[in-house]
Amino acid sequence: MMKYILPLFLVLIANAAMADSLAKDKKTLENLEMELEQKQEALDKQKEAVKALEKKLECNYNLLQSYNQCEEKHEKNSEEYLKCMEKAKTSNAGCMDNA
């Protein structure tokens, strides 16, 4: 009878140790999951910021293209050139507001 008690006792100790280990592993996994969610949120914010910067870059590029067209069309008439530049600036203002 005694020879069966020792193995059973060892099994009980092993099960208790495994339960403790599983609880620690579960906590570790929960912490990793929370960290992963935080990093995903940060990544999503960075992606939004990049999209906003891309939109602003596109607006600025279009404005520069408009300015270049004004210069080409009205290089000899400064009054028309200034009107064209102002129109380009006004037209592009909405783009920057939405960026």
Image (spheres, grey):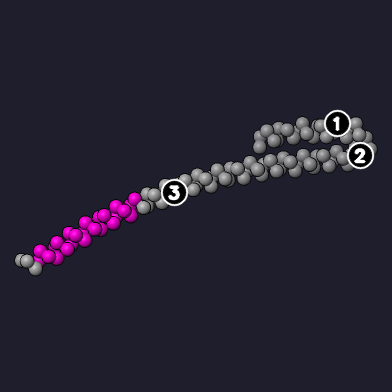
Task: Tell me the quarter of the picture where residue 17 sits.
Answer: bottom left
Reply yes or no: does residue 24 show up in magenta: yes
Q: Position of residue 7 (x, y in %)?
A: 14, 65
Earlier residue among tags 3 and 1: 3
Amino acid type, label 1 = Lys
Magenta stretch, main secondary structure class: helix
Q: What residue is disc 2 on? A: 75
Above or below for 26 versus 59? below
Q: Quick one: SS at disc 1?
A: helix
Q: Which residues are magenta?
A: 4-27
Q: Residue at (62%, 43%) from the top-left corner?
A: 51
| Outermost residue toward the bottom in this view | 3
Q: Quick one: SS at disc 2?
A: loop
Quarter of the image containing the N terminus?
bottom left
Amino acid type, label 2 = Glu
Tag nearer the camera, 3 or 1: 3
Q: Residues within 10 Å of mark 3 (few under 14, many from 20)?
A: few
Q: Are marks 3 and 1 in contact (CB under 8 Å)?
A: no
How much space separates mark 2 and mark 1, taking CA atoms? 12 Å
Q: What residue is disc 3 on? A: 35
How much space separates mark 3 and mark 1, taking CA atoms? 55 Å
Q: Residues within 10 Å of mark 2 (few under 14, many from 20)?
A: few
Earlier residue among tags 2 and 3: 3
Earlier residue among tags 2 and 1: 2
Q: What residue is disc 1 on? A: 83
Q: Are marks 2 and 1 in contact (CB under 8 Å)?
A: no
